[in-house]
Amino acid sequence: MAKRNSSNDSKSEKEPWRGCYYTLEEIQKHNTSQSTWIILNHRVYDLTKFLEEHPGGEEVLREQAGGDATENFEDVGHSTDARELSETFIIGELHPDDREKVQKPTETYITPVNSNSSLWNNWLIPAIVAIIVVLVYRSYMSE
């Protein structure tokens, strides 16, 4: 069962789930369409009401139900909006004693849309290569 700390700081007001712990055994029981819980970065999410709304389909979430979905969540590359929405489904945290039993959370690397490296990699370098190819082709064809 969940245990709650009795702290009255501003963090617990913004994040009422802080200090509410669930064991891995308890989380694993919530792997049905009637109750779907997952673990992301040691936080516990109740996604039962979100199953039908998930853009990737209900099956994707159901496959991860009752377990740690951190790696799969990060691999998909969810948007900032999706990450913010996910915060509304947090119900607690994985109990510290069980954290060793699941894989360690991976760090999140989000590249900003206005990143200069993204501009170079996605547009400028391919454009320059295309221009060079056209010039070489024209030079070859004019001979």
Image (cartoon, helix red, strand yellow):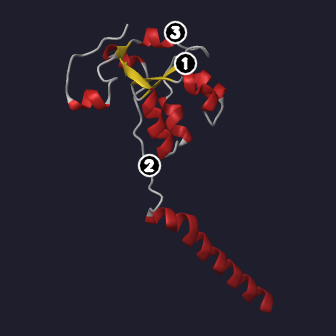
> Going 51% across and 45% down the picture, which residue do you hit?
79
The mark lying in front, picked from 1 and 3, is: 1
Whether residue 61 sits left or right of residue 140 in the image: it is left
Task: Report whether residue 143 is seen.
Answer: no
The residue under label 3 is 29
The residue under the point 39% across, 11% down is 23
| Amino acid at circle 1 | Thr
Along the polypeptide, which appears first: circle 2 or circle 3?
3
Percent of width and height locating residue 96: 31, 17
Q: State which tag comes first along the sequence, 1 or 2.
A: 1
Residue 107 image-quadrant placement: top left
Name the residue rendered at 31%, 11% in the picture. Answer: 3
Alpha-carbon span between mark 1 and mark 3: 9 Å
Q: Position of residue 104 (x, y in %)?
A: 40, 28
- Cα distance in 3D space between marks 2 and 3: 32 Å
- In the rendered view, tell whether residue 138 sits above or below residue 14: below
- According to the image, label 1 marks what residue? 36
Q: Looking at the image, tell me whether mark 1 or mark 3 is earlier in sequence order.
A: 3
Is 106 or 34 nearer to us in this picture? 34
